[in-house]
Amino acid sequence: MNIEKVILAVLAAFVCMSIQAQSLKFSPGKKSEVKLLWRGSRLDVSVNDNGHHKLSEFAFETDKRLHIKLEDFNFDGVGDFAVWHTDDGMGTYTIFRVFVYDTKKGIFIEYSPGCGDEFINLTIDKQNKILSSTYYEDNIPKQCVTKLPTKAANR
């Protein structure tokens, strides 16, 4: 392999990594700022909260495009986020991972649904303060209702 091919391969890999690295900033509360930074299938979560800085890392195992949804998932008045993608099969349903901001610890905590392994086709019922999703039992779809703890009940 000649040196020109090696240089082109390294440059191509660098450009692909640069394109995949995307970021988003938001403020979950009055004194905090969050930066979400994608690095391929990894998400770095940087939180600056009242002068304190914390960094968390989350990995995702899918070839599908990842999306961010900013919302108050536990209805405590503080901003949270979810990462979602279509399923790895035919892409007929959406899979969510929900991250709730813990104001005491200054970090995001991932929550799972009350039933099933993941939030599938997640909907948010603000009036009743619940999350509704689908889970499967013996290949039969069922509704799962989840109520996440508010900040007073955070772990």
Image (cartoon, grey):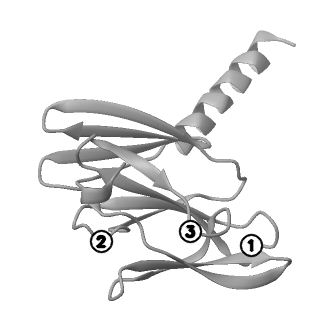
Q: Is residue 153 left or right of residue 9?
A: left
How busy is the neighbourhood of tag 1: few (under 14 within 10 Å), some, or many (20 plus)?
Answer: few
What whole-number distance in Å separates the C-alpha atoms at marks 1 and 3?
24 Å
Q: Is residue 128 left or right of residue 16?
A: left
Find residue 59 and report its horizontal and vertical position in percent: 60, 41
Residue 133 lies in what quarter of the image? bottom right
Find residue 103 and report its horizontal and vertical position in percent: 24, 48
Q: Earlier in the sequence, mark 1 or mark 2?
A: 2
Q: Is residue 124 left or right of residue 52?
A: right
Mark 1 or 3: in front is: 3
What whole-number distance in Å separates the C-alpha atoms at marks 2 and 3?
16 Å
Is 125 placed above or below 38 here?
below
- Give the residue at x 31% y 32%: 54
Label 3: which secondary element: loop
Label 1: which secondary element: loop
Q: Earlier in the sequence, mark 2 or mark 3?
A: 2
Which amino acid lies under the numbered mark 2 shown in the image of this protein?
A: Phe
How busy is the neighbourhood of tag 2: few (under 14 within 10 Å), some, or many (20 plus)?
Answer: many
Q: Nearer the viewer, residue 65 or 101?
A: 101
Identify the residue position indicated by label 1 in the image.
91
Q: Quick check: marks 2 and 3 in contact, CB under 8 Å?
A: no
Identify the residue position indicated by label 2 in the image.
75
Label 2: which secondary element: loop
Say the numbered circle drawn on residue 114: 3
